[in-house]
Amino acid sequence: MARIYISIGSNIDAEQHVRIAVKALREHYGELDLSSVYESEAVGFDGDNFLNMVVGLSTDEDIKTVAHVLHDIEDRHGRIRSGPRFSARTIDLDLLLYDDVICNEGGLQIPRDEITRNAFVLWPLTEIAPDTKHPQLNQSMEELWKAYNKDSQKLWPVKLDNL
């Protein structure tokens, strides 16, 4: 079984779509470890604020299968891929970590660069996996979060019930 971490983000009917994403992941994978939900300003474009969180789970699916499942969930819930890279999203699911695998092929980048670049990924990931090591940097998520410039992005926890 592989231990994986997935980020969830939405800024279109965000509360509804975060709930939908968690429900879909739970239906497919079973038990999930859930971070808190965080609100952040859009990064890379002007748009509504995002809600973000990270889930952890164990699976026997390989990386490509997981990526396909995530892509399918996004598509089933209105994800539009024809627009600019940085744009509004109903559901954005990114595979952040897959055990300690390093992969950069077929459109997959594991671990995701967003882990060290974006507070809305690193903070919730640290919350549920503080001792997990970044496979390339050999630092724990907690160490990375402590060193992160927290003034670089505005981010705050929000209450989202019924997850």
Image (spheres, rainbow, N blue to C red):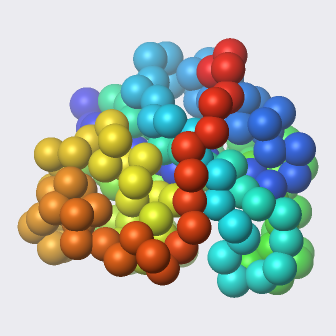
Query: What residue sits 69% from the left and 83% below the top?
Result: 44
Closer to the camera in the image, 89 or 122: 122
Count of numbered badges drawn on the protein = 0
- Picture coordinates of residue 13, whole percent (x, y): 88, 44
Closer to the camera in the image, 3 or 143: 143
Q: Is residue 44 left or right of residue 146?
A: right
Query: What residue sits 75% from the left and 30% below the top?
Result: 20
- Picture coordinates of residue 153, whole percent (x, y): 53, 73
Q: Is residue 121 left or right of residue 9?
A: left
Tell me if residue 86 can be seen.
yes
Image quarter of residue 102: bottom left
Image quarter of residue 77: top right
- Picture coordinates of residue 131, whole percent (x, y): 15, 46
User: As displayed, is residue 72 above or below residue 95?
Assistant: above
Tell me if residue 64 can be seen.
no
Image quarter of residue 147: bottom left
Split into 4 quadrants, where in the image is the C terminus?
Answer: top right
User: As displayed, is residue 85 above or below residue 16?
Assistant: below
Query: What residue sits 44% from the left and 17% below the top?
Result: 31
For this orientation, the residue located farthest to the front is 151
- Picture coordinates of residue 69, whole percent (x, y): 61, 42
Query: What residue sits 47% from the left and 58% below the top?
Result: 121
User: As displayed, is residue 98 above or below residue 112?
Assistant: above
Split into 4 quadrants, where in the image is the N terminus?
Answer: top left
Closer to the camera in the image, 60 or 161: 161
Q: Is residue 97 left or right of residue 10?
A: left
